[in-house]
Image (spheres, helix red, strand yellow):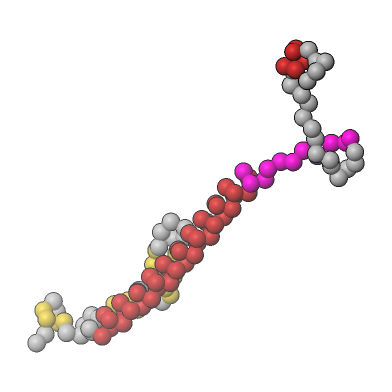
Amino acid sequence: MQGESPLNMMQPRPLRRRPTAGGAGRPGPARRRIWPVVLPVSIVVVLASGWCALWYYAAGVANREMAAWIQREAAAGRVYSCGSQTIGGFPFRLAFNCTTAAADATVGWHAGRKSK
């Protein structure tokens, strides 16, 4: 560049700004990237939703398996009953609660000896 001294050429040039919607010469608001905040939050929400869905699915499977076990035992002559059955323990465990549980295993067993 003719007519400029080497010292002037070594200084950084001012950055050109893009034209803004606000008008000529006025800088617009600074744009912030939103993905560093949205991405981790959305990952946590997706993982928590998946965990909840998995837990409720496992609770349903456990409830069906417990009902099937009670039926298998009844077919073998051992009758178990519950006043009310609940599955709890969310979010980190599965707990089967049975209030007023009762068992009748008299079929096939008498006084500690198996009947013939």
User: Can you see residue 29?
Assistant: yes
Report the side of 44 relative to 84 (left or right): right
Residue 13 is a magenta residue: no
Which quadrant of the structure image shows residue 99? bottom left
Which residue does the image show at 84% across and 42% down from the upper left? 20
Q: Nearer the viewer, residue 19 or 93?
A: 19
Q: Nearer the viewer, residue 5 or 26?
A: 5
Q: Position of residue 14 (x, y in %)?
A: 78, 26
Q: Nearer the viewer, residue 60 or 10?
A: 10
The secondary structure making up most of the magenta span is loop
Residue 34 is a magenta residue: yes
Which quadrant of the structure image shows residue 26? top right
Answer above or below: position of 108 versus 15: below
Which quadrant of the structure image shows residue 45? bottom right
Q: Position of residue 5 (x, y in %)?
A: 78, 12
Q: How many marks?
A: 0
Q: Residue furthest left?
A: 116
Q: Position of residue 101 (x, y in %)?
A: 35, 74
Q: Position of residue 64 (x, y in %)?
A: 38, 76
Q: Which residues are magenta?
A: 25-36
Answer above or below: position of 15 versus 94: above
